Amino acid sequence: MDIKMRDEGEVAVLSLSGRLDLANGSTLKDQIKQLFTDGKTQIHLNLAEVEFINSSGLGALVSIMKEVRLIKGRLTLSNPASYVQEIFEITQLSHIFEIYSTEEEALSSFQVTPVRV
Amino acid sequence: MTSQEFTYPSTPRSVDTMLDDLTAVLNREAVERGLIRRMLLAVSEAFTNALIHGNGLDPHKLIKVRLAVNETDVVADISDTGKGGLNDIENKKPATPESESGRGIDLIKHFASSTSFTEGTDGGLQVTLTFLRSNKHTLSNI
């Protein structure tokens, strides 16, 4: 899995690509923990390029969500492919995550204007 | 019928290797894209269970995956050399919304057309997953 990070104001935006499974879920959790250490508490994950997710990847996202709550931060997700969205719905995790159709919508919800490159 | 067997050490990285191997076989056999996604998800769940709960992430213990592709179905056997675990599967409670684990068996049962869990006499668990090639539970082709 590839993780590209950038800042949009106070929000750390991570664009994920590839598979989100056991090994890659741990990598993602480690990167998010580093963001917490750096003082970032507003996290957005763009899932547009995630081609595969299983229960290990979902577990990593749940773990991150719980960590974000503990530090009074916020986690949003966006752009899941339809089959990824389907897995969120089957597992009923679509009810506990803030999932937006687009990154722009998610960032707007943080009241941050996305920087267009 | 095409049948192929793969063997992996019990390390987290083996999940990706196994997915690459199975994807190559399924693409070569022109298996439908939605079925490939459904299969890879279910097999990855059984494989991860074998990795963690069966073989305890011991890299010296191996996981075998056998894949058989027919015109009507695709069958995957995933077997570990661990301590069984059939009772744990049969008595498994549903994951709560905020659980970090416990969704794998539910996903397997959702996407596989049929499932079989067998405990070997020498320990270890064999999971057999059958996927009908016309099954309605198909993940999106998008």
Image: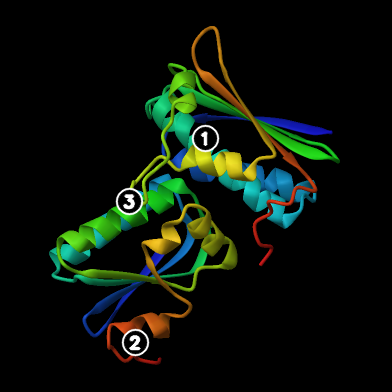
User: Does the rendering let one see residue B18?
Assistant: no
Q: How far apart are marks 3 and 1 (CA)?
A: 23 Å
Q: Are marks 1 and 2 in contact (CB under 8 Å)?
A: no
**Is A4 situated left or right of B136 in this image?**
left
- x, y percent for residue B86: 49, 20
Which of B29/B102 is in front? B102
Query: Which marked residue is nearer to the observer: mark 3 or mark 2?
Result: 3
Q: Mark 2 lies on which chain?
A: A
Give the total number of marks visible in the rendering.
3
The residue labelled by disc 1 is B47
Q: Measuring 38% from the left and 65% from the top, which residue is drawn there?
A: A3
- x, y percent for residue A39: 13, 70
* Quadrant of the image occupied by residue A8: bottom left
CA neighbours of label 1 inside 10 A, class few (<14), some (14 to 19), many (20+): many
Query: Which marked residue is nearer to the observer: mark 1 or mark 2?
Result: 2
Q: Do the residues labelled 3 and 1 touch (CB within 8 Å)?
A: no
The residue labelled by disc 3 is B98
Which of B140/A116 is in front? B140
The residue labelled by disc 2 is A108
Q: Which amino acid does label 2 sit on?
A: Ser
- Dividing the image into 4 quarters, which one contains the N terminus of chain A? bottom left
- Relative to B135, is B8 above or below? above
Secondary-structure class at tag 2 = helix
Q: Residue A29 carries which label?
A: none
Q: Residue furthest top?
A: B121
**Is B130 situated left or right of B30 in this image?**
left
CA neighbours of label 2 inside 10 A, class few (<14), some (14 to 19), many (20+): few
Q: How far apart are marks 1 and 2 (CA)?
A: 40 Å
Q: Which chain carries label 1?
A: B
